[in-house]
Image (cartoon, helix red, strand yellow):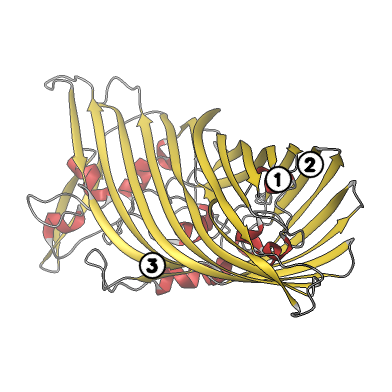
Amino acid sequence: MNQRILLLALPLLLGVSRAFAQDEADALRYSRLQFGGSARTLGIGGANVALGADYGSVSSNPAGLGLYQKSEIQLSPGFGVSNGDGLYLNPGNAGGATQLSQNANNFNLSGGAVFSGRRNRQNAESDWKGGAFAIGFTRVADFNSGSNYQASLSDGRSLFQRLREPRTAITGGVNSIVGQAGTNSSYYNLDGLAFGAYLTDTTSRVVNRQRQYSLLTQTRNGQIGQGERITNTGSMSQFDLAYGGSYRDRLYIGVGLGIVSSNFRQRRDFTETESDPSTPLNNYTLRDEVQTDGSGFNARLGLIYRFSDAVRIGASVQTPTWMRLTDTYSSGIVANFDATPGYAASQTESTTGTNQYAYKITTPFRANGGVAVTIGKYGFLTGDVEYVGYQQARLNNDPNNTLGDDASFAGTNAYIAQNYDKAVNLRVGGEARLDIFRVRLGFAHYGSPYNKATVNTGYTDLAQNYYTAGLGVRTGSFFVDLAGVYMRYNTYYSPYLLNNYTEPVIQVQNSRFTTTLTAGLSF
C-alpha cells in the first residue's frame, strides 16, 4: 500500500451525504487534551499527579485534595495567541510555494473553590484525618488555531483533476451524478456544488440500452494558483466535582466527576485561480463551515502515598469521556468568469444549505503516575507519566436524537483502531521558594497519537512540546501566580485526494502562547 497521510487529512466535502465530517479527525480532536488548572499548575508543566494541595489536582488526581490544610477560592483568567504557518510541501516542478501565517487569539477563564474539613492531626479517634471537597471549571482543550498557504501547480494536481476523475451514474439521471436530491433541492456533495457553479457539465451516452452520465470540467489552461485559509475557534471545558481524603496522613484517596462541554467552529476557504485570457474561468472559492456543540461526562480515581515528608508518589485513572455532539454544517462554491466573446463576465454560486447531524464519541481511557520530591523549605521537583490509548476512541450513531440516524461508523472505527496508537505523555516541573516569592519552570512532551506504520516516514515530528514558566507571591491568606505556556507542534493534511496519489500535502507549523493569572484567597 502506498504511504499516504490520510489519517492527517482534512479532506474537502467528497460526497458524504450523511454529514460534513464525523470521522477520525473528530475522535482525535476530543481525545488529545492539554493540562490545565491554575497558573501554579501551568508554571510547572502540569506535573502535579503526586504533588497535592494544588487546585490542578481536581482534573488530574483528586487525591491531592486530601493534602489541603485550608480552604481556598481562586480565579484564573488567561489569554492565548495561536499561529499557524502553512507550507506546500510537494509543489514539484509546477511552481513555487509561499509560507503564510494565520493567527487566532482567545480569552479563557477558569477557577474554583476548595473546602477543607481538616481534623486535628493529634485526633486519635479516627484514622481518617478529614479531606477537602472541590468544585470548579477548567479548560482541557484549546481549539483556536489556523493555517494559510499559497502555491502554483499544474492542472493535473488541482481540484479540477478531482472533479474529472471517473464517476458514472447509470441510473438516477443527472441528479444522481451531480449530487442533488431533487430538481429544486440543494446539492449535497462536491460534484453537485461544482455543477451548480458551472465548473462542470454533464454528458451522456447509451451503453447496453442504459444511459450513462459523466462529468466534463470547465475549459482552462496553464498553471493554477491555489490557496487555503483555515480558521478554528473554540474549546473544551470541564466542570469538576471532586473529593480527596487523608488516611493517617500517609495515604490520600480521591474521586472526581467531570462534566464536559465543548464548542468548535471551523471555516475553510479554498481558492483556485487561473490567468489565461482565452478561457472563461477566472477563479472559484469553496467554503466549508462547521459548528460542533456537545457535552459529556467522565470520572476519576486517584491515590497519593507519602513515604516521608520529602517523597510522595501518585497515580490516577480517568474513564473514557462519553460525549453527545451535534454538527451544524454547510458548504458552497462561488465562481467568477471573465468576459469572453459572446459572454459577459459573471459570478455563479451553489450551496448545500445548512444541515445538522447528531452523533456520539467515546474518548480513550487515561492513566497517570507521578512522583514529587520536596526539598525542605526551598521548593520541590515533580514529574508525571501519562498513558493514552488513542486507538480506543470510537464514534457511534445517535438514533434517539431527532437529528441523528442509525448510520454505521464501523469503517471509521476500524480506521481509528488501525491507524491511531497508544501514546506516552511526559511532564516535569519544579518550584523554588524565596521567602514569599515563587519561581517555576516546566516542560511537557505529548507523544504522537498516530501509528508509525501508517504515517509517511517523512513526517515524524508529530508530538506536542510545552515550555512553561511562572512566578508567584504567597502570604498567609492571599496568593497571586502568573504563568506562561508556549506550545509547538506540526500537522499535515491534504485538502483533497486524487486517484494517482499526487494531491498536495500541506505542513502547518503550529505554535501557541498562553498567559494565565491566578488570584486567590485561603481561609
Between 13 and 517, the one nearer to me in the picture: 517
Residue holding disc 2: 440
Give coordinates of residue 464: x percent, y percent: 66, 49
Residue holding disc 3: 360
Q: Nearer the viewer, mark 3 or mark 1?
A: 1
Q: Are marks 2 and 1 in contact (CB under 8 Å)?
A: yes
241 relative to 361 in the view: left or right? right
- Local packing at callout 3 (Cα closer than 10 Å; few below 14, some 14-19, many 20+) is many
Callout 2: SS: strand
170 relative to 520 in the view: left or right? left
| Quadrant housing residue 280 | top left
Give coordinates of residue 365: x percent, y percent: 58, 71
Residue holding disc 1: 40
Asked if 13 appears above or below 147 in the picture, the reply is below
Mark yes or no: residue 85 visible: no
Between 56 and 265, the one nearer to me in the picture: 56
Callout 1: SS: helix
Tell me the CA gap for discs 3 and 1.
34 Å
Which of the two labelled residues, at mark 2 and mark 1, occupies the earlier sequence position? Answer: 1
Which of the two labelled residues, at mark 2 and mark 3, occupies the earlier sequence position? Answer: 3
- The amino acid on which the numbered mark 1 sits, given as a three-letter code, is Arg
Give coordinates of residue 96: x percent, y percent: 54, 28
Asked if 460 appears above or below 104 in the picture, the reply is below
- Local packing at callout 1 (Cα closer than 10 Å; few below 14, some 14-19, many 20+) is many
Viewport quadrant of the N terminus: bottom right
Tell me what residue is drawn at x 18 percent, y 32 percent: 348
| Quadrant housing residue 74 | top right
- The amino acid on which the numbered mark 3 sits, given as a three-letter code, is Lys
